[in-house]
Amino acid sequence: MFSATKRDTHAIWFTHLSDELRRDLEKLHANQEVELLINDHPTSWARMRASSVGSTPGLKLARGRPVWERIRMGETFTIGLNEGSPRSEDSSNLPKLEAEFLLARNRIGQGRPLFGGYEFADFSGARDKALQRRAIRLAIARGGEAPRDVGRSLTRATLQEETLHRLEAANSDGVRLAFGRDHQYSIPSGLAMEIGLAGKTWREALESLVRGTYGGPVLSHASEFAREFNAWLTSRARPSYFFSCTKARDYGVPSQDPRPSRFGAINPTTFRLTELCQGIKKGCVPKPLNRIGDNGTVGGQTIVGLLLLHELLGEARRRNIPLAVWPFDGLDIRSTAYNGRHVMFEPYPSSVRDSGVEQTDLNDAIASVLCIQRADQAGQLATLLDLRALTEDQRARVLVEGWIVGHRP
């Protein structure tokens, strides 16, 4: 293996390589492909076309863009001939997310990016605004640029303002945004059925939860809503729903799951279908909606997040911001319902954060951006966001429950 420095976004020039490797590569014919190990990952390159003054002294990238894009301009990498490998791209040694993209590319070929910008927030269900400012981070990126922090501390209220402002600015700039927040966008279908929301669309169910028209308490902070919701259920001879291992006394809820899964059967009121499917990282399983207040749980931030989501949809309509939410508006991102609209997605940062990257609020926001951005810039986002392979019953369930980006159907 040899060392080299990245000096081009799509090419490797022979003059930047060691003499030994350059001599081997100069033997290639114009457009002939060769497989190179870049940082020990297989990639494919093609000899550049000959011109009137002779052969162009370099290679152009054919396959392996995710591997190449992980290397920053001016950064040193290892390179060598992969003489024993087949011509087709081998993704077995790639990080899981990138392997998925490469496999998809082999199936359908490369397409154009669907979005021009990517913005994801690591959310917080804390009541205290100081805690919100410490926890909420918004990462943004345009095109293929590196994601960055938006550069200001945010509460849930100011995040809402920032999101609407950035959507309007993107409209003015003619940029289509992919964005989201790391909480669930809906409740499990089993719970919806139990509380009288069966048969409603996602937007109708969200409206009913926010207004309390389903018959139970209106959405509020988890420390209030969980207790009230449990009391409403028990008054109807139903088991309690919410629990907390660390804040049971503060929230007035059980300290153990009142609806555990039994005999290998997952409780349909606590888990959505997407949470039962394999994410990008094996063994990385989201916690159920009904667990609140504990580290790593999403129930509390989902309760307050649904309130803001409902408000965001209404305010976008009022401001004439074209907005859709995947997959509720169509299981395939290429559906006409998404044409010309900004699209909101539900991320799960722990499942897509690169191995070796420290878990922080900002890194979780950046990981969510990278999940969508990498796939989109590689022309493979449409494959990642197509759930039509599900059965008819599963498709109907997902249109109400939602889906985590990157989970395989």
Image: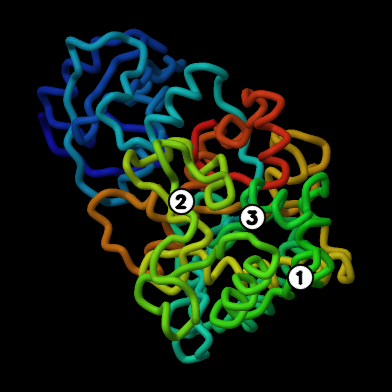
**Among the two numbered marks 1 and 2 on one chain, the one whose residue lies closer to the N terminus:** 1
What kind of element bears circle 3? loop
Q: Is residue 154 left or right of residue 1?
A: right
Residue under label 3, please give it: 187
Amino acid at the residue labelled 1: Val
Which percent across, then down, holds residue 81? 18, 19
Residue under label 1, please give it: 210
In whole angstroms, how far apart are the C-alphas of marks 3 and 2? 26 Å
What kind of element bears circle 2? helix
Which percent across, then down, holds residue 252? 50, 81
**Among the two numbered marks 3 and 2 on one chain, the one whose residue lies closer to the N terminus:** 3
Q: Compare residues 47 and 172 and report the one nearer the observer.
A: 172
Residue at horizontal 43 percent and vertical 56 percent from the top: 287
Q: Residues within 10 Å of mark 2 (few under 14, many from 20)?
A: many
In whole angstroms, how far apart are the C-alphas of marks 1 and 2? 32 Å
Residue under label 2, please give it: 370
Between circles 3 and 2, the one closer to the viewer is 3
Q: Is residue 167 left or right of residue 238?
A: right
